Image (cartoon, grey):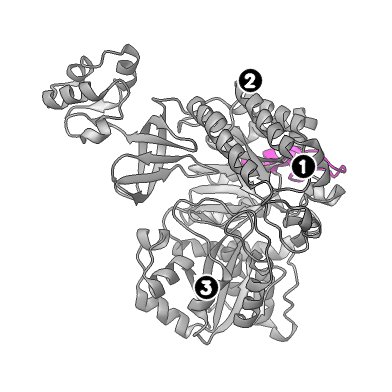
Amino acid sequence: MIVAIIDGYTDEPAGLGVPPYLGIYPRYAYGALKKAEKDATIFYLTIDDLRFTFEGEHGIRTKNKTPNVFETRKILEKADLIVYIGGLHTPGKYLSAVPSQVEEVSKFIKPFKGIKILGGPAFMGSAHEGGTKIGSKELALANQIFDHIVYGDLEAFLYDFITNPADADPFRFRTYKELRDYAILGAEIVKQFPDYPVVEIESQRGCPKAAGIGGCSFCTEPLRYRKVEDRPVEDIVKEVEILYTLGVRHFRVGRQSCIFSYMAKPDGRVPIPNPDALEKLFMGIRNVAPHVKTLHVDNANPAVIANYPKESIRIAKALIRYGTPGNVVAFGLESADPKVARLNNLNATAEETYEAVKILNEIGAKRGYNGMPWLLPGINILFGLPGETRKTYELTYEFLKRILDDGLLLRRINIRQVVVFPNTPLWHMREKVKTEKHKTLTKHYKYKIRHEIDFPMLKRLVPVGTVLRYVRAEIYDNGLTYGRQMGSYPLIVGIPKEVELNRFYDVMIVGHGFRSITGIPLPIDINREHSKVLSYIPGIGRKRLIKILARRPFRDKEDFLNMIEDKKSREMLRDKIITP
């Protein structure tokens, strides 16, 4: 049997599978197929492979490793099964990979004869931008193109479909006991993934708060998983061990709504955290992956941290002790307006979120060896929710301003427009979603937050002269190279020249944008470096640059440094320049 798994890239509330991330769905599908038929030949393709093959468009896969167009066509022509994995529920801005929708992949795979199966969160629809209401067009098209649409777990359906097709149930969910084999066998798929994946590791599914008092109005997670299940520590550690043996060095223990609620005790709105379980988990991961380069997490409910500070501090310290710097926990505040919070059943109040931000700053704001603080919070803001007024936007802005004024750090502020998915509580309130009514307000406050909060926050987070290590160059654009560190919500670094892609660089930060930064690769060869790059060096203005270019080549460092009048700039540059 020949199978083609097509990864359309997924992004949902509790999981990410957009390169350089490799999500759970392709791995589990691969493992289920291998367990069902060990002799199956399984090819991993991405939507970028198909874009390049049929339209000549380049994506992350085709830039890093151009596929053989003939081979891609040949795989699809011979495939007995064509499994498409997609679904975009929390759309954002992506650096070098763009998730697909059913409409796009359908035109590519329609001519091929293999049995077509759709899996992942795509059965609920996708949204490439906020402020939309998902209709039935995409879902109707899916029913026309695909022979089977999986509403439960894709891996459970695939195993059943191969071993006993008559009884295969597209609504069936697997257990964690069943998943163990799929995860271990599916790890092998990383051999076919583009360079340097960050592998997303599942730790829990379902939302503890939703299980207690109901989920947030907009969230799709409680729709798919109506109860909370914690994956056993031993199974997570074993999967990491196999992946590590295969060469993976970047991990994110994500695929959960709140890492601080892993194996927590249910208690209504705010579960009681279990620091012993988190310490055991991350110590176990470090024992089997001692030289891991990235070990990060994802979401956290700030209400848990604020209401159980003692337990949460223990958890935060474990994440620092066993993890790597640059780690971020995303707080789902969504809105600082208490009326909007109540109407939409949001996770935490503004005060709880502020307290959680403060606690994590006290524990994790110290800068680590890669140049980033060890563990910081991020804030998710969602515009367009029912109940919003002009005052809502002002309250949210003032909340963020308070964090800035109090000298605290946020790694990111993610501002999105709400997307209305069928069968969520928000779907039944969709007439109250006033996206268009508040369009001007949204635009104004987004601009205000970016300019008055994000910009000074970035300057505080990574001041000029900070060295960020292990920045991977990903794409070129208009003479610039854009890259980022591996991990959760890494900063985008613009390098003012073209450098070799898919390599890691140490860069010195020399400038700030509203959501990104400018950096120069180190060391700086002051005798050979392009004048454009030299112009970014702190302490060098236009006039001094002309003098420097006229004086080159310099005999040694001191010969160059003597031309820099500012003492602080001289000391900053002393160990960052070379004169070969």
Q: Given contact means CB atoms under 8 Å apart, are the residues at marks 1 and 3 in contact?
A: no
- Marks 1/2: CA–CA distance: 23 Å
Identified at 67% across, 69% down, the residue is: 123
The kind of residue tagged 2 is Asp
**Do tag 2 and tag 3 residues touch (Cβ < 8 Å)?**
no
Residue 70, relative to residue 239: is it above or below? below
Query: x and y percent of residue 343 in the render?
Result: 83, 45
In this rendering, is residue 332 above or below 451? below
Magenta region includes residue 265: yes
Kind of residue sitting beneath label 3? Val
Q: Give x and y (percent) for residue 439.
A: 63, 47
Q: Is residue 504 left or right of residue 178?
A: left
Residue 3 magenta:
no
Q: Where, by quadrant of the figure, is residue 274 drawn? A: top right
Amino acid at dot 1? Asn
From the top left corner, tell me how far across and down residue 526 is, in percent: 21, 29
Query: Quick check: can you spot residue 271?
Result: no
Secondary structure category for the residue under label 1: loop
In terms of sequence position, does the residue under pointer 1 or pointer 2 come before the other?
A: 1
Q: Which residue is mark 1?
A: 347
Q: Quadrant of residue 413?
A: top right
Residue occupying image coordinates x 78% and y 44%? 346
Boundaries of the magenta span: 259-284
